[in-house]
Image: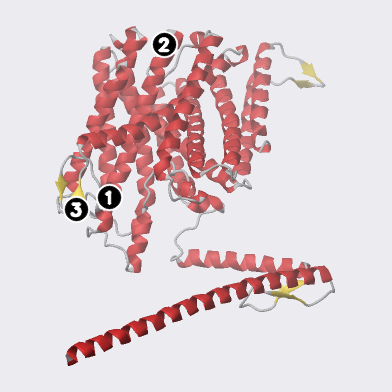
Amino acid sequence: TMPPFAFTALVLASKFLSVCAEEQQQEQETEGEEEASPKDIAIAATLIGAVSFQMGLFHLTNHRDKDMRKYTYQVINQTVSIFCSVLMFSTFNDIVQAQFSGVSPEMKVLVNMGHMLVWFLILQLTLAWACGAVGSPPSDLEDVELFIQCSGTLLAHITGFASINAWGSVQQISPFKESPSLCLLVLPISFTGQFLLQRCSDWARWKVAMKDEELSIFEEKWDEETEEAENDIMGLTLSFNLIQAVRFWDTSYLPNTEGDEPMDILASHTRIQIQRLWGLAVIFALCLFTMNYYSAKVKMSGRGSRESQELPPAGGGAKDTLSEHSAAGRDGGGESPHRPGPKATRVFSFATSTGTHTHKNFAEELRERSWEITKLAWTMGFAWCCFYAGRMSLARIAELEESMTLAVALTLSISLISFSLIRILDMIADLDSTGPRVDHTIFQIIRALGLLVGFGWEQTFDQAVESISSAVAFPHLAKFVLALFCVVVIVPAWYKYILPMAITECWEWGFLVHDLEDPEERARWERVAQHLEEKRRKRLQKTGLTPKGEEDNFYVRLTGDDSSQVAQLQKENARLRQALETTVLALKDRDGVDAGKHETHKVNLAQMDTLIQTSSAV
């Protein structure tokens, strides 16, 4: 696994050379050529690093271990979605802040809360429309599923960062900014506010879904996807607010709403402060491991195969996909999307009961969501702790005093260490000695490491946008252009080519399989099958074997006298023949038992007939 990460050392070395070149301001000539300027070295380092990074991704996405391919696609999916979400949120947030510049901190809190509520409402309406709960239902469930995952992931991240900004601004006002303990009080306040929003949205979904007294699979999907998005929003908010208070306690300095500190303060943190933050990351990891281990005791029962314990895809956690419902309907054995049935007993969250559609009471809803959100908070808290501890550690290096250089070095270091740990954990999970619960817990730790990589690249992208926009006369316009570029170019590419690889099984073979009902797509895969068949024939011809017929897969030797291969084929044939004979004997024994039961039933029937005749005669 080392070759994929060689680019990290290469980029860091190039950055170090760039810093050294800045210290040498005098121009020198060597063999008639001028020495490269620091700007030239920086551009060269960026070019080499970018190419090396892409080659590293090719190594990982084509890894011999299919689980590593899956984790790589999931991390890329998370990173791109977080980048797009941060870019779009920061663009709109800058416009909002520019309109309300100069207002008091208390008024800024109200503005940020309103901004967050707008995105929360957009999330609810978009998922309702995409799932067909509002308006006409979609004609094809399979086509709309990918759009639901895309819109839900993007809007959940945007709303999550808006919530971080809103509740983070509460921590910046009196009396919460006076001490770490008061700053920590924002945590239960934000939980209460977010939970009340969730209850209101649950009530609204229930009213809309039961307006026609029927619960369709579209409305089920709407409820599932919305709950997943709301949990992600609260997990992001609580974890970030907690880490803000912890950093305030650890360093006696409260970072701003984005978690940033001035470079002089960032570089002055002591070793004990950094070690405490790393220790807190370990505690979060242990809490995450313990909660997932014991919560998996019930969930993992009856699951013996590792395939049943896969991580939920980034951006969605629904257990039943729309395509499964669609396939059941086409086969005639499933339920109608518009008719309630056994699968349509989806449990919504408001306290009442109507027919077969039940609601959870307040205590049950609070307990279940608190448990899931706590696990999400531990996961994201671990990622935040590792990120900020790593930033504080690297900031002590004098050569990394520039913000952009520090961001790039930190992100590449995080990527190197995280993918190495993911590989080690995957190898542990592959061991036969680990049970289903341990494997499930390891997968959650891997998910947390994937979030760490996503957070690292998100901060780097944000710093890059700030650097580019600060170099132009109109920074807000520059951010808007970058956001427009993101929407027009990056989001469609992520939607078409990256997201499907992460949420489907396509990561296993490394390419997308589209609708086979399309004649062009069907012809394409027929050509692929013909190509594979031709390669197989050529390989067999080289070994001296050739197919005996098109109808089977048995082969006979036509040329040569290699007795070893003949003996191997005979041995395999004998093994198969013995297995077949064993199966035939087992079937005969079962037939004998069935015949005996049949004879016993015939005797019992004859006795009953005799008793009936005797009774009639009497």
Could you tell me the amino acid type at mark 3?
Thr
Location of mark 1 (residue): 220
| Residue 198 drawn at (x, y percent) | 25, 34
Residue extending farthest front: 618
Q: Is residue 356 left or right of residue 36?
A: left
Location of mark 2 (residue): 249
Residue at 43% x, 14% y: name it: 247
Residue at 70% x, 69% y: name it: 572
Location of mark 3 (residue): 356
Q: Which of these two is toward me, 432 or 125?
A: 432
| Residue 68 drawn at (x, y percent) | 57, 43
Marks 2 and 3, the one that precedes in the sequence: 2
Q: Indicate the secondary structure of the residue bearing disc 3.
A: loop
How far is the residue under mark 2 from the one under mark 3?
51 Å
Picture layout, residue 401 above or below residue 466: above
Q: Which of these two is toward me, 350 or 411?
A: 350
Could you tell me the amino acid type at mark 2?
Trp
| Residue 446 drawn at (x, y percent) | 51, 36
Contact (Cβ within 8 Å) of mark 2 with mark 3? no
Could you tell me the amino acid type at mark 1?
Glu
How far is the residue under mark 2 from the one under mark 1?
44 Å
Q: Which of these two is toward me, 49 or 179?
A: 179
Q: Quadrant of residue 171?
A: top left
Q: Indicate the secondary structure of the residue bearing disc 1.
A: helix
